Amino acid sequence: MRAFADMAGFILYNRVRVGDGAITLSCRGNNNQILVDITHGENAGHIFHKLTFNSKWLMSYIGKTIDRYEFRSLIGKGTFGEVYRAFDNRLLRHVAIKAAFPKPGDDGQAKDNIIREAQIIARAEHANIIPIYDVIDDSESVLIVMRLVDGEDLSQMLQRLGGPLGVNEAFAIMRKVLEGMDYAHRKGIVHSDLKPGNILLTDDDEVVIMDFGLAALLEIQKPEKGKLYGTPYYMSPEQIHGKYLDARSDIYALGMILYRMITGRHPFEGVNSLQQLMSYQIERAPETPDKYNPAVTVKFSNRVLKALEKNPLNRYYSCREFIESLGDALPAVQQDEHIHQNQRWDPRVIVNLKARIKLEDSGGWVPVKMVNLSVNGACMAVPIALETGSSLHVEFEIPEDDNYVRMSSLATVMRKDTRPGNDTIEVGVNFDGLADMDKKYIALFIRSLLLK
């Protein structure tokens, strides 16, 4: 399906891929803006209550040479830009280049965000993540140079088959996706838009994840209230509510994808409106996969459904745990010899922050030093004895320019480490009451440290 909106002599081209069911898309131009309402469609792309029109989207790089890259043809267009097939004249190879166009009026901040996020993603060097080769700050856009992958995406594969995959084949594909996402999560990267169309299957039987967070880059630091980012058919309940997103939101989306792979249908197939879809994502538990495919065991079905729990605390805490749980439900599948140690999804960075703690049964504050930090917890050097399981209040300060931002939370002592010769005890705590806005701020702080 293609939609066109004529605005003051310009044409805005937007392609919307449609899965099963119908889709309604209405465009209304007003003051260089287009309001887009997408009511249905599994692969209906990103939902924006207000999409700002940028005439730079209409330009074409075909036939141009920028830096060492010769633009050959257009591969596709999306909400924020275009993807081209290009040739690298220095390394003599074909590449894909995404031209990402910032929103007007951002005074360069949006381009800085795109470059910054691309730098973080470039650190995630994994066989199942599409690599970024280069980033160029062009006068009109930011050009992100990536590996060119020949093959089809998972959505195209499922549509071509017209039914479910075999359970072992589905697990083999999903395992590679989960391994790639496990690595990304440990690097502090949350995808936020996983769907079949963003999983590529190459002609050499590789599985590659693409489009890491690029849909939300323009406004990643200043999300607008009431605006949704992502693909509704694969959004977690917390993503619909606009809350802080971590790896467990990605795990929900991967559970949705795996459900479709082994049943041939989306868990909430048949909904007749976007509002109903959102309601189901938030409130309704899907039917068990074995109901639609007898080849799926009850045990494997239950392992998939755990990823689709409405409360993220009840899901797998990491993609590695998801892999091991699925593999345990398929004893006939040969497991790789290397076994990774379970790791939490949230990355920890080394810090040296001022902090203080107060036990629940004590009225005095004790100064401590925070030595590492994650969104979910921290490690601190404390001068007093603390027992595992103790509850306490934590206050700490995060630097911001020439000032500090103070944060506070209830916390639980998860471990302690007393080392000979030290006058302090190292304790690890888990934050129990950190606000969503504080989590977002900490995540941005951690990302800034990952670039150093």
Image (cartoon, rainbow, N blue to C red):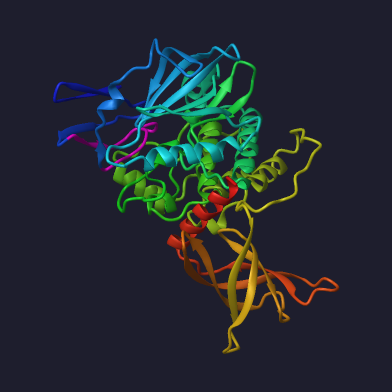
Kindly identify the residue that appears in the image at 60 percent across and 47 percent down.
452
Kindly identify the residue that appears in the image at 62 percent across and 49 percent down.
318
- Please provide percent x and percent y for residue 446: 56, 53
Q: Is residue 39 magenta?
A: yes
**193 vs 83: above or below:** below
- Please provide percent x and percent y for residue 70: 47, 13
**115 vs 343: above or below:** above
Q: Quadrant of residue 380?
A: bottom right
Chief secondary structure of the magenta portion: loop
Q: Which residues are magenta?
A: 32-49
- Please provide percent x and percent y for residue 5: 20, 25
Left-right relation of 45 to 194: left
Q: Is residue 143 magenta?
A: no
Kindly identify the residue that appears in the image at 60 percent across and 34 percent down.
177
Q: Quadrant of residue 75?
A: top left
**Nearest the eye: 220 or 451:** 451
Left-right relation of 324 to 404: right
